Amino acid sequence: MNSEQKKAVLALKTAKGQIEATINMIEEGRYCVDISNQVIAAQGLLKKANLLILRQHMNHCVKEAFEHNKGSEKIDEIIDILSKITGK
C-alpha cells in the first residue's frame, strides 16, 4: 500500500468513527446542529479520501495506460467520476 492509499484508509476509518458517533448522537437525541456538524465533518473526510484515491489512480493506473496507448479509456473514467462529483 502506498502513502496515498494509507492516507485514504486513515481518512475512511476516521469518517467511519464519525458516522458511528453521529448515529449515537441521533439515538441520544442530541442537538440537531451538532449532529449536522458531525455529518459535514464526515463528508469532508470522505471527499478527502476520494481525492487521495483519484490521485493514486492518476499517478499509477492512468499513467500506465498512457504508456500502453490506452489512455483514452482512463480519461473517460475520470470524466465519469468528475461528472458524479460535480453532479452534472
Image (tube, rainbow, N blue to C red):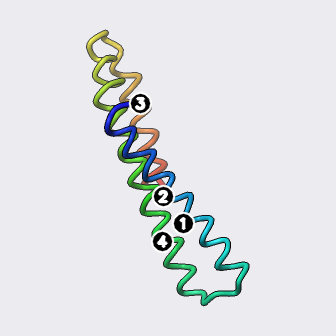
Query: Mark 3 is on which residue type?
Result: Asp
The circle on residue 40 is 4
Between the C-alphas of marks 4 and 2, the distance is: 13 Å
The circle on residue 18 is 1
Nearest the viewer among 40 and 69 is 40
Residues at discs 1 and 4 in contact (Cβ within 8 Å): no
Circle 2 sits on which residue?
A: 14
Across and down, in percent, residue 27 comes to: 73, 79
Between the C-alphas of marks 3 and 1, the distance is: 33 Å
Residues at discs 1 and 2 in contact (Cβ within 8 Å): yes
Between discs 4 and 2, the one toward the N terminus? 2
Between the C-alphas of marks 1 and 2, the distance is: 6 Å
Between the C-alphas of marks 2 and 3, the distance is: 31 Å
Q: Is residue 85 above or below residue 61?
A: below
* SS label for mark 1: helix
Query: Mark 4 is on which residue type?
Result: Ile
Query: Mark 1 is on which residue type?
Result: Gln
Between discs 1 and 4, the one toward the N terminus? 1
Across and down, in percent, residue 63 comes to: 28, 22
The circle on residue 76 is 3
Q: Is residue 40 above or below residue 65?
A: below
Crowdedness near tag 4: few (<14), some (14–19) or many (≥20) residues, C-alpha within 10 Å: few
Query: Mark 2 is on which residue type?
Result: Thr
Between the C-alphas of marks 4 and 3, the distance is: 30 Å
* SS label for mark 2: helix
Between discs 4 and 3, the one toward the N terminus? 4
Across and down, in percent, residue 18 comes to: 54, 66
Between discs 2 and 3, the one toward the N terminus? 2
Residue found at x 68% / y 79%: 26
Residue found at x 28% / y 30%: 59
Across and down, in percent, residue 34 comes to: 53, 84
* SS label for mark 4: helix
